[in-house]
Image (tube, helix red, strand yellow):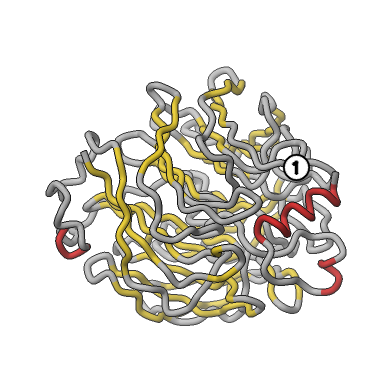
Amino acid sequence: MKMKFIVLMVLALGCFTLSPAALAADPAWGGSYPNQNTAEGDDALFSLMTGADNTAMGFDALDSNTTGSDNALASWIWRVTGNLNNKRGDHTATLLQNGMVLVAAGAEGATRLASAELYDPASGAWTVTGSLHDARGQHTATLLQNGGVLVAGGVSLVGVLASAELYDPASGTWTATGSLTTARYFHTATLPRNGMVLVAGGSDGNGIPIASAELYNPASGTWTATGSLNTARYFHTATLLRNGMVLVAGGFDGSTISASVELYDPASGTWTATGSLNTAHGRHTATLLQNGMVLVAGGFDGTGNVSPSAELYDPASGTWTATGSLNTARLAHTATLLQNGMVLVAGGSDSNTSLASAELYDPASGTWTATGSLNTAHAAHTATLLPNPIMVLIAGGFADGRPLSRAELGRGRR
């Protein structure tokens, strides 16, 4: 199963290589979750701001709606916006408190990037900002309560990284902060209500999943070990629930794609097993819905095939229920919670080719509906919800192994 999984990863995403040691066991690069604030784009931020009007974004043919009330909008169209300065995939994108979007690091072919850039929704242009100290990809980026951005871990040309650094939007510079206690990539990073950053799982670079978890304290700039996962894993998701717990689901456990799920309690620092997925998922997405349930969609299944299945987690009962399947099986896609409560899934890979298709999930009916396709196929890209007017920014990624500089804006219409 492990060898089949590696081969499938190469076919689905492969474009460049790791260190010789990593080649023996880890999947080839080519995409990971846009790691937005939690790398999966689960918890969309709605820090409303004054935004540009529709015509500035090339959406003059759409109904004018700049108030943020897009609840009636049920289909999406996409328009090309300014290109990134660097082609990149396996990067992160973070919506800053000032309304700009920070894209950091990633990979361009065989090169790991230290560069970072800012997207201005008002102008539709990208501007270079300060570079990271360490080039990296497959890292996480977390928006802290103080407005800074914490980048942690990842992998570079010299191996897996433990280093972490902080971005200051006011100065546009990065500062080194305390290193992780365990170097890792393909991990998750979640911001609990206490303001600490929880990093969990990941790969050590030799194909061995990590069970350890650790907490970053922004006040001291240091990491402290917390309770370990019951199941070591990477390619999992981590979702902050309304009750303050963190739900980790699925992933690769070293031999197969796992259906196991567990909950982290920030108060006790411990993990507890909860109901298992009905279908194993890895490299999937997990989205916190407005009703407090969690939608898991796509990714690899337990046989190593790309799956269209989706299911819902109910925190009250601790159980999963199957919901409507995606129209197109996919992995390395993005899932964005929209203000109207629907979930927009875009791009990804079907294991043979990168995808341009997009679809909308309606929690009321439990069904998926195809919507407008991206202009360019994207996999291992990022998707960021812009607040006013409501739009989704797709940036970078890979198209059949080729890194992209393309960025697109999606907007709902009636």
Name the residue located 62 percent from the left edge and 68 percent from the top edge.
137
Q: Residue furthest left?
A: 64
Callout 1: 10 Å neighbours few (<14), some, many (20+)? many
Q: Count the marks: how many?
A: 1
Identify whether 2 is placed above or below 136. above
Look at mark 1 in the image and give the residue it sits on.
Answer: 304
From the viewer's side, name the closer residue of 33 and 374. 374
Quadrant of the rendered image containing residue 386 = bottom left
Residue type, numbered disc 1: Gly
From the viewer's side, name the closer residue of 122 and 97. 122
Query: The C terminus lies in which quarter of the figure?
Result: top left
Name the residue located 79 percent from the left edge and 74 percent from the top edge.
19
How far across and how far down the image is residue 14, in percent? 69, 63
Quadrant of the rendered image containing residue 250 = top right
How far across and how far down the image is residue 390, in percent? 26, 49
How far across and how far down the image is residue 412, in percent? 27, 45
From the viewer's side, name the closer residue of 123 and 299. 299
Residue 256 appears left or right of 202: right
